[in-house]
Amino acid sequence: MSCSGAAYPAPRADYIRLSTTVATNALLERKGHKHALLITKGFKDLLLIGNQSRPRIFDLNIKRPPPLYSEVVEVDERVTLVGYTSDPQAEKHAVQFNNDGSVKKGYTGPGHDEHDFADGPGDIVQGISGEAVRIMKRPDLEVVKRDLQRLFDSGYRSIAIVLVHSYTFPEHETQIGQLAREIGFTQVSESSRLLPMIKMVPRGVSSTADAYLTPILQAYLDGFFNGFDAKLRDGRLRSPRVEFMGSDGGLLDLSNFSGLKSILSGPAGGVVGYALTSWDEERKYPIIGIDVGGTSTDVSRFNGRYEVVYETTTAGVTIQSPQLDISTVAAGGGSCLTFRNGLFLAGPDSAGAEPGPACYRKGGPLAVTDANLLLGRLIPEYFPKIFGKNEDETLDVEASRTAFEKLASEINDSQEVSHELDEIIYGFIKVANETMCRPIRALTEARGYSTGSHILTSFGGAGGQHACEIAGILGIKTVLIHRYSSVLSAYGLALADRVYELQEPSSTFYSSSTRSSLLARLDKLTKAVQTELARQGFEEDRIKVERMLNMRFDGTDTALMVLPVPSDGDGDEDFEAAFKKIYKAEFGFLLETKNIVVDDIKVRGIGKTFDSLGESVYSEVERIKKTPVDQSKASSRNSVYFDKVGRVHDTPVFLLDNLSLGDEIEGPAMVIDNTQTIVIVPGARAVLTRKHLYLTLE
């Protein structure tokens, strides 16, 4: 707001893009919005029981996280499915419907008796998935209205509605949701709208997460929009266009952005940033992205397409929603360094921003940042003077040294052989590096990919200090560090595409007889997606469409979202071959005797922000003339500790802005700009391109 209390006019810009960790932090800290759960009668404790998975089965003191909702109201309604989809003759046994969705008169099929098709409370209707749904009991809306009014009078303003089989028969949820909005509830999370997918537990938990997080997110967005002209929020302005980063790496408009879709909003921007700036469509080198921040390190993989997962567990909450496959480990610049039971530990506790590491002059604990400082990998002279109680001092080297000398004394007293201070400090760095490598191996080696065949892209504030050594541990020979790597998440946000997707449930065997109907449904969703993106201002040639089927082998419960190649909607999409290829890669075998079931159909529309970022970094490195850097360009020399080499007292320090295109730097060396410090280890070479520092390791 301005000093006069009037709102600022909308900024003169083409777009405003935001990513946020508000919902993520609310979930991690359990500081979401109080809400109630409405669920089918008899299933009151379903979400509390969960799926009975035991990730820490051998722990002696397991504490189950409490549910997100504060109160449960049971709704006396019930629908059920007719027949069994696992019947090998399911197509012959299926209920037959007229065009209006009613059961064909006089039809009885195997497994059905006359009672199945009786009129009244046992009405048979066709669900969205094509399954036959028998309505056993409709909800008494007057009773539901009284329950909702009681919740409203008790102070609830947010509810989640989760009913059995609502993924295919959403009518009852829709009726209850309409009642709730009429009463005055400001947040109504209907599971059938959020996630029209089978599996009631993850669908239900996801809906409660949305009811828990969306009000917090809305309060954050209100604070943003209230500072501007109201026209900015209601869409009456053609520009700027306000967009938000979703967990799947796509931009969403305000009407489609919710707490459920924002859980990975922050890290997703970084994945988009490195993917678009490091990928080469001709060479197709797979990329590992490692985002080293203050508290944690986020790791992901890109091989020409964003790797998306549809079920994740965050802070003990299993959420069913498309998210980029990002693994997080508690190791970053602020990770606390401790010595316990004869072991060096880096994390999981963090010094945080307040008080921060010991060198921040606020009495904080030893952290990875302190170790890098004493090893010479951070230089106080190049840091802003923002530390101390008055936030006007530089980093405190002596505070770090005093704390480490005390810890080193404790360590040496417990060992038969004493170690030098540098060796002990670097020992903690090695532990931190290995901790960061762990999720990388899970994304590569554990899935059948060789880490050495990848390129490492490092970003985040502390990434450049660890990139070379992490690459060396993993056998990676090439490292890319973007000029804006310390703010690459924000850069990726500027490069991201607008996304709009539609999904419908299905319960169909994939066969030659059903393929045409599945493609027809995909065509219908494709048209709807293209229409919506056109409404949002994208021309036809800037809209890309991905058509997917969520497929599994009959008798299994693990479905895989399959994107065939090519996916151009011309009828040549081979989903079966694509599914078997993905399944074989994931599990190592195929169930050749089993039928393939399609659980969901999905169309993802992408409104392209740009066509190309220009020449790839790999082509540029091959093309440009490389010249050994003029050592006179070094702004200073610093004493830096390296593994196997020890202290190199005259390590050159280069300012990135002083280097020229094609300058080749041989390690050991350091490259610094206003927001990052890059350590080039002995044996590594770095070439400066227009947008990257291109490093190669022996």
Image (cartoon, grey):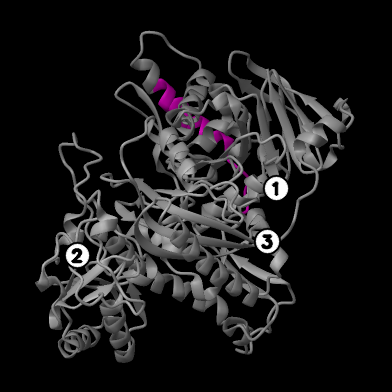
Q: CA gap, disc 1 to disc 2?
A: 57 Å
Q: Earlier in the sequence, mark 1 or mark 3?
A: 1
Q: Which of these two is toward me, 161 or 317?
A: 161
The label nearer to you, 1 versus 2, is 2
Image quarter of the N terminus:
bottom right
Question: Mark 2 falls on what kind of element?
Answer: loop
Question: Mark 1 falls on what kind of element?
Answer: loop
Which residue has dot 1 on it?
A: 484
Direction from residue 553 to residue 83 in the image, left or right = left
Residue 566 x/y as whole percent: 60, 48
Label 2 Cα crowd, 10 Å radius (few <14 / some 14-19 / many 20+): some
Amino acid at dot 3 = Lys
Tell whether position 404 is magenta. Answer: yes
Q: Which of these two is toward me, 355 or 316?
A: 316
What span is in magenta?
392-409
Amino acid at dot 2 = Val
Direction from residue 486 to residue 185 in the image, left or right = left
Question: Mark 3 falls on what kind of element?
Answer: loop
Which residue has dot 2 on it?
A: 82
Residue 436 x/y as whole percent: 48, 33
Which residue has dot 3 on it?
A: 608
In this rendering, the count of numbered labels is 3
Q: Earlier in the sequence, mark 1 or mark 2?
A: 2
Q: CA gap, disc 2 to disc 3?
A: 43 Å
Q: Residue at x 41, y 55 (%)?
A: 513
Label 1 Cα crowd, 10 Å radius (few <14 / some 14-19 / many 20+): some
Q: Are marks 2 and 3 in contact (CB under 8 Å)?
A: no
Q: CA gap, disc 1 to disc 3?
A: 22 Å
